[in-house]
Image: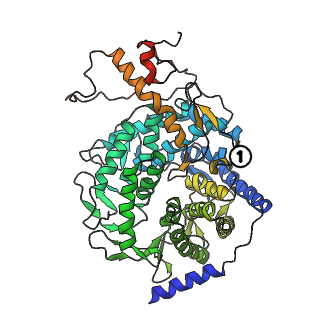
Amino acid sequence: MRSLVCVTLFVCLWCGAEARAFTEEGMSAVRQRIKSMFYHAYNSYLDNAFPYDELRPLTCDGQDTWGSFSLTLIDALDTLLVLGNRTEFQRVASLLQDTIDFDIDVNASVFETNIRVVGGLLSAHLLSGRSGMQLESGWPCAGPLLRMAEDAARKLLPAFQTPTGMPYGTVNLLRGVSPSETPVTCTAGVGTFILEFATLSRLTGDPVFEEVARRALRALWKTRSDIGLVGNHIDILSKKWVAQDSGIGAGVDSYFEYLVKGAIMLQDEELLKMFQAFDQVIQNYTRFDDWYLWVHMHKGTVSMPVFQSLEAFWPGLQSLLGDIDAAIRTFQNYYSVWRQFGGLPEFYSIPQGYTVDKREGYPLRPELIESAMYLFRATGDHTYLQLGLDALESIEKIAKTPCGYASVKDLRDHQLDNRMESFFLAETVKYLYLLFDPAHFLHGGGTEGDGGWEAGGDAGECVLGAGGYIFNTEAHPLDPAALYCCSRHSGDRQQLRELLLSPSRPPADAPPSKDPPTAQSETIALKPGEQKTPPLLSCPVQPFSARLTVLGQVFSDAT
């Protein structure tokens, strides 16, 4: 009964939140405030923390957190272009090429490196056509940022070399997986690779990335309980669930997100069917009064009646599937928590209507703002703009320091923590800005960085930037058109090159060799001043399907 009273109270809080109508002039003014927020944080990082991963805004210095490769700069790179700053985008893209080296003896999170580094570099690469920088011939199928993304992703591949195909959670970028590495990792750490890795495979023509991501997804799918749920942490070697709480929040969230977004980006029915099966049991077992609780994966009984801030992505995901009414109702619940505290605590007890002990913090997460952006796009309801303005003013009031913006350690008394996560610039600010810019090119409009499309591919035969961008879980936008721009020729080129240069190799359908593959340790990123060497052979410009019309001739670049 108490939870029913709380839910009723939350709905009333929503009803009392009168949303004003925002004019275009008013939205433009808010966008300028968001830009000011970004540059205060960004310049503070450059002045006080670069080349460390993150800014410490209370002591005005930096720290390495996820791998020692200037993570905030990589994460913020595409945000610069989203805000229309081409000059700084060009400068930072060049700086990263000169300073970042992934051949380092560092233990890195496979999950975080993928979503932040690989995703950030891929997004910047695909957006560089709008930046005014000189593009390499064949872009988006070639380019220095693409090579850096591929280099980083190759460092993660040893983690996938397991009997099950599910990856370890940590890998040493120089030495691979440690023999003492724990085999226990979270669900999201297994199922959050298909967007970045499929994009890499389609752009580079190397299928290994998409293959390992799909193998991991399929292996995880087979571990569902008898009632169709997955848990929170799994032993990737034994396939036994170590943490058996099932929900949509921390440790699981982006797995569901990537099934939906992967299905959209790749037009993949298999991924969509996986999500639809999960969604059915999620609705049956975890949804109560448009909240989503944690339940036991085998029994379906409630184990934790809490709302986690990471769950706030769910209404946005529902809107992508067209389930607008359900998304609105759940968003109402989450927004009421924001209004109660001026932010979303990491854990919120639904029966008690208050924060959970030692989970009172708010590290300036973006998920509720992300859902507001999607729902505003879907409905045009200015209530979501009001949430954005509330978020902007809360962060300015609570978290701003002379050296950036600090995570909130405790929302009850607004104590601050000495950390500014890189996702604040990659996600929170970006989603806020896009919420108030419905005409932005990422929405298919024509502002900030030109709204026109670009031609890409070897002969300019591809159309990019026409819309339909898919955001990875770190808010790095990926252009689905680019995937088809390159993949039409790359596989055929590789097939012909192998046929001509290695005629003694067995055919593709021959049994695999028992000899282990040779490891690739050479970096593929260009060093400062190094020029790309063209291949000795290349296919003609015509589609490969037309090669018989030229009698199988092979043309050199000079022909």
| Label 1 element class | loop
The front one of 339 and 248 is 248
Residue pictured at 59% horizontal, 78% vertical: 340
Residue farthest to the right, as pictured: 25
Residue farthest to the bottom, as pictured: 1
Residue 189, position as x, y percentages in the image: 38, 53
Residue 255, position as x, y percentages in the image: 40, 56
The answer to whether residue 556 shows anywhere in this view is: yes
Which residue does the numbered mark 1 point to in the structure image? Answer: 448
Residue 302, position as x, y percentages in the image: 34, 77
Residue pictured at 48% horizontal, 66% vertical: 311
Q: How many residues crowd mark 1 within 10 Å: few (<14), some (14–19), many (20+)?
A: some
The front one of 260 and 522 is 260
Task: Say how many tags the image has.
Answer: 1
The answer to whether residue 173 shows anywhere in this view is: no
Report whether 303 appears left or right of 20: left
Residue pictured at 73% horizontal, 72% vertical: 20
Colour scheme shown: rainbow
Residue 152, position as x, y percentages in the image: 45, 38
Within the image, what quadrant is residue 301 found in? Answer: bottom left
For residue 336, above or below residue 98: below
Quadrant containing the N terminus in the rendered view: bottom left
